[in-house]
Every structure is written in C-alpha cells, then in structure tokens.
Amino acid sequence: MSNFVMEVEGLTKQVSGNKKIVQDASFQMKRGEILGLLGPNGAGKTTTIRMIVGLIKKTEGKVYINGNDIDTEGKSCKSDIGAIVENPSFYDHMSGYKNLQQYARMSINERITQERMNEVIELVKLTHAINDKVKKYSLGMKQRLGVAQAILHKPALLILDEPTNGLDPKGIRELRDYLRQLANQGISTLVSSHLLSEMQLMCDRVVIMENGNIIDETNIAALNENGSSDKLVVALNLDKAGIEGAEAVIESIEGVTTLKRENDHQLLIEMTHDLIPQMNRKLVQADVNVYGIESKKTSLEDKFLALTSEDKELQKEGK
Ligand SMILES: Nc1ncnc2c1ncn2[C@@H]1O[C@H](COP(=O)(O)OP(=O)(O)OP(=O)(O)O)[C@@H](O)[C@H]1O
Ligand SMILES: [Mg+2]
C-alpha cells in the first residue's frame, strides 16, 4: 500500500483561450495528516479540488488515492474519499437523522449501521439536535451534518473546500477539534482556505497556491514548534533604565539582533528560540530588569504575504 493517502502529480486545468487556471500542481498527503490548500481568491483551490473529486475533468496530471489511479480505479478511489465541495443540500423538512439515512441509502453502496450513524453524529457533535428538522439548523450545524454525511462511509480522505466560510469562531474551533479527532483515527483531511491564521491553527502542513501554481509548502508543526530553526520575533519587556543595557547585551550575543525599540520599555528582537535562555541569563547578569519575554510565533502570514503578489502590490504602493 502506498505511504500516501493521496498523491497529486502535475495536475493541470486548461480552459478556453489556452489559459491554465491550475498548472502543474503536485503535492502529497500522508495518512492522518490535515493538509491546507491556502491561496487568495482565484488562486485555483476549488478547481484543484474539483479535479480531484472528479467534478470537472483534468487537462493533465495524475491523482492517486491510496496508490490507486483515479483514471483507472475510479470506483475504489471514490469510496476512499468523502468531500464537501459545493454546499451540501439537505431536505429541510426532514430531521438531520433522516437526511443522513436518506444519503446513506442513495449514495453509499454498503449498508451503514445504526452504530456508525451514531458514531458519526457524536463526532460532529450533533447528538442533541439530530432529530430536529434541518430547517431549524444554523449554518454551522448544517456544515457539521455535511461533514457527518461525507464521513459516513469511513473514507480515508476527507476533502473540504472552504469549510470555515460563514462559521463563527466557536464553529471554527469545533471544526478544528473534530478534524483533529478524525486525524487521530487516521483520516486525512484536505482543507482549502484563503485565511492564513485559520490554516495555521488547523493544519499540519500547508501548500500555498497563487495564480494556479503551487508556490510553497510549509510544515506548520515545524513552524509552531519551538525548536524550529526559523527566526522568531521576541518582545522583551524592560524598564526605561534597562533598555540601553539590554541593547548592549543583545549585541554581544551571536545570532540575536535588535529589530527596533517598540517604545521606551519594549524591544523587538529577532532570534531563534534556543537562544532565549542565554539572552535571559546575560540580561540578569548585567543587572537589567526583565519584566517579560514574549516569543511570537513565526507567522505563516509573514511567509504567505511575502510569497503572494497581493503583498508585492502593497509594497509597490508604498503601504
Ligand atoms: N471554467 C472556467 N473557465 C475559465 N476560468 C475559470 C473557470 N473556472 C474557474 N476559472 C477561473 O480560474 C481561477 C481559479 O478559480 P478557483 O475557483 O479555482 O479559485 P479559488 O482559489 O477557489 O478561489 P476562491 O478563494 O475565490 O474560492 C479564477 O480566476 C476563476 O475565475
Ligand atoms: Mg474556491
């Protein structure tokens, strides 16, 4: 069996006028991984997803699900995927439960047991409302019912296009939680978004798309992990008297640079995480009063903005 739940190779979509709206996109997904497809509006995220799930034809490229080629083994690939690409439609006058039952009867070949129904309902936290009519559901509840529907047949891979759209912060958090639960059960999720901060919280890894191309891949775990070799911005809280002393200490440590005096009691410093204790020790030895050291995570946002042309446009305009 392939090590990857999904491999996408050279995926390309050409539309009229020879325009390629997705060009040579390649990425892989590991089992139990939550992978983000991040890009600004029009980047080609939905087009990529629609090609993977077979809603539109790909112009070129290969997609393998659990090692199976979707072109030649479409049926087995399909049973390995659960997806919400367009908003799922429900029968409003029926309960959530009846909707799930109906979906299971119409769209899934195998019989879905009562036990599996309850398991999925619990996972998406709809137990309390599952017998209510769907017309009474909030957007977030409908979305959870959609996810329940998509995972009923125990797919290895769940694909969600912009699942946080329209959700409130609580809903987003809950989505994050149950995607993580699914991941712990070995189910991988591909999730698209144009919101970096969300992706940073939700995903293990992110591929960044712009103008139909994949332009970067970032391991979020490494980005968030403190042992990362990436430089961090650290805010050092001092008193007025300490500021100059602190600057002198910081200059003496290799790999630590003062970025700026934020105000007369805070310095912003660029450094790797592992140098924080050394800096702290030296500051104490130099009798500098340290009121706080706050390490700010390397933000995916910085990386994303540096990569996408939106930011370049802003720079051009001198903003
Ligand atoms: N059938 C088509 N013919 C021509 N152009 C298309 C077609 N479908 C999509 N596009 C264009 O391709 C680009 C990528 O669209 P896509 O919907 O994949 O982007 P997206 O990353 O999902 O954006 P969003 O964040 O807005 O959902 C857009 O500029 C879109 O207008
Ligand atoms: Mg889209």
Image (cartoon, rainbow, N blue to C red):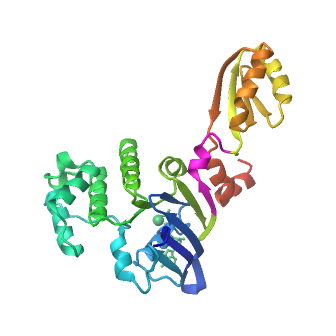
Counting labels gives 0
Image position of 45 with respect to 307: above or below: below
| Horizontal side, residue 85 vs residue 215: left or right | left
Image position of 236 with respect to 167: above or below: above
Residue 24 percent location from the top left of the image = 60, 76
Image position of 22 with respect to 97: above or below: below
Q: What stretch is highlighted in magenta?
A: 216-228
| Horizontal side, residue 83 vs residue 243: left or right | left
Residue 212 percent location from the top left of the image = 59, 71
Image position of 280 with respect to 118: above or below: above
Residue 203 percent location from the top left of the image = 50, 53
Residue located 58% across and 86% down the image: 17
Is any atom of residue 215 visible in this view?
A: yes
Residue located 41% across and 48% down the image: 176
Name the one closer to the observer, 76 or 193.
76
* The quadrant where residue 260 appears: top right
Name the one closer to the observer, 204 or 11.
204
Is residue 227 magenta-colored? yes
Residue located 78% across and 12% down the image: 287
